Image: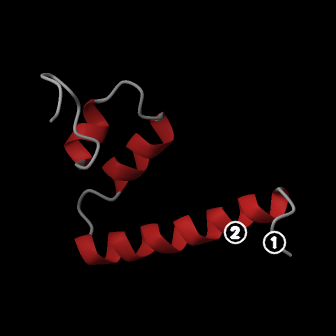
Amino acid sequence: MREIGAIDHTTLDGLLADPATSFALKAVIEAWAERDGLDAEHDARLLHAALARDVDHRLGLAP
């Protein structure tokens, strides 16, 4: 059950409405707003994988 007035972080509008969402993430959401949803989702997955690998490397968890 969600709180009344709780922000839905599973939607783009919810992320944009949240003052805690970083300016960088809001900029990406706005810049990608007119893109094909599947293309944007694919690129987001690639970015996530690359960032996760970079973090693991920096923490010494991956070669």
Q: Position of residue 11 (x, y in %)?
A: 22, 49
Amino acid marked by disc 1: Ala
> Could you tell whether 38 is left or right of 47 in the image?
left
Q: Residue at x 29, y 37 (%)?
A: 16
Q: Which of 32/14 is in front?
A: 14
The way the protein has been coloured in the rendering is secondary structure
Q: Residue at x 47, y 35 (%)?
A: 22
* CB-based contact (under 8 Å), mark 2 and mark 1: yes
* Whether residue 31 is visible: yes
Which SS class for mark 1? loop
Task: Write down the quadrant of residue 54 in the picture.
Answer: bottom right
User: Which disc, if any, is residue 25?
Assistant: none
Label 2 packing within 10 angstroms: few (<14), some (14-19), many (20+): some
Whole-Å distance between the Cαs marked 2 and 1? 7 Å
Q: Which residue is mark 2?
A: 53
Q: Position of residue 15 (x, y in %)?
A: 30, 40
Task: Write down the quadrant of residue 38 in the picture.
Answer: bottom left
Q: Residue at x 58, y 71 (%)?
A: 49
Q: Position of residue 25 (x, y in %)?
A: 44, 45
3, above or below 39, in the image: above
Amino acid marked by disc 2: Arg
Q: Which of 19/59 is in front?
A: 59
> Could you tell whether 11 is left or right of 57 in the image?
left
Q: Position of residue 23 (x, y in %)?
A: 46, 35
Q: Residue at x 25, y 31 (%)?
A: 17
Q: Is the N terminus in the top left, top right, bottom left or bottom right quadrant?
A: top left
* Whether residue 36 is visible: no
Circle nearer the N terminus (2, 1): 2
Q: Which residue is mark 1?
A: 62
Q: Which of 3/57 is in front?
A: 3
Label 1 packing within 10 angstroms: few (<14), some (14-19), many (20+): few
Which SS class for mark 2? helix
